Amino acid sequence: MNADIPFLRCWVRQRHISKSNGLEEAYAFAIQSVRGRALGFHCMMKTGAHYRNVPLHALCLSQDAPDRQPEDCAYWDCFTSRPAVTVFDYLRDHECTALLPSGERESGVYLFTLDWLPDDAVHPGFTLLPEQNKCGHVLSLASGNLCMLPSNKVVWRDGYWCGNDPHPEKAGYVAQQAIYHAESCDRDFSKSDLYFY
């Protein structure tokens, strides 16, 4: 249910972790994924306390970031309790436009990507269905907040490859629905005892 992330200096909105208001400086250093719940973070607080399962909307990267609710920061709860975190080198520090659940567009920068493995083979949930499976790109937003968005809600920008005002919605992309296999019933290599079969 836990996975390391590139550590992130941030502030935690104290009302989510104490009886106080205001912000406390922290480092978020891991995530916590529980199926059906909002993404949580492990944070080392400035006081020396390690606080776990701090929700995404409780973190901010600037002290004047506007307050958010869980549904403002992510479209989906966690799919399983087996997260996998990847920092795609190609996307590292890449600028983008985040298409937020509110319908707003906000500039952002890529931090890392969260994927989910099936909890078990008997109950894989949506993770094995191509039309349902989603990753979550965690982004630092210009407002100072964080968000976690699926690939179809992030428009990547750069001055060289796709430009600074791309419009992928005009390309007519559709959700992936096929499952492909390299192996077929027409060929069977397993019965040969030749080394170079």
Image (spheres, rainbow, N blue to C red):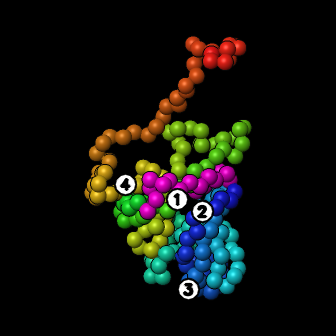
Q: Position of residue 102 (x, y in %)?
A: 41, 63
**Residue 88 or residue 135, whichever sits in front:** 88
Vertical relation: 25 (above or below) 173? below
Q: Which mark is residue 112?
A: 1
Residue type for callout 2: Ile
Rendering coords of residue 151 (x, y %): 45, 50
Q: What amino acid is found at the position of numbered circle 4 in the picture?
A: Val
Tell me the crowding category of disc 4: few under 14, some 14 to 19, or many 20 or more residues within 10 angstroms, Cα based: many
Residue labelled with disc 3: 22
Of pointers 1 and 3, the one earlier in the residue sequence: 3
Q: Is mark 2 on a helix, strand or loop?
A: strand
How far is disc 2 from disc 4 in space, using C-alphas?
A: 23 Å
Q: Mark 2 points at which residue?
A: 5
Asked if residue 75 shows in the view, the reply is: no
Looking at the image, is mark 2 or mark 3 earlier in the sequence? 2
Q: Mark 4 points at which residue?
A: 155
Sequence-wise first label, 2 or 4: 2
Quarter of the rendering occupied by the N terminus: bottom right
Sequence order check, earlier mark of 4 and 1: 1
Mark nearer the N terminus (1 vs 2): 2
SS for tag 4?
strand
Task: Report the residue at 54% width, 66% height from top.
Answer: 70
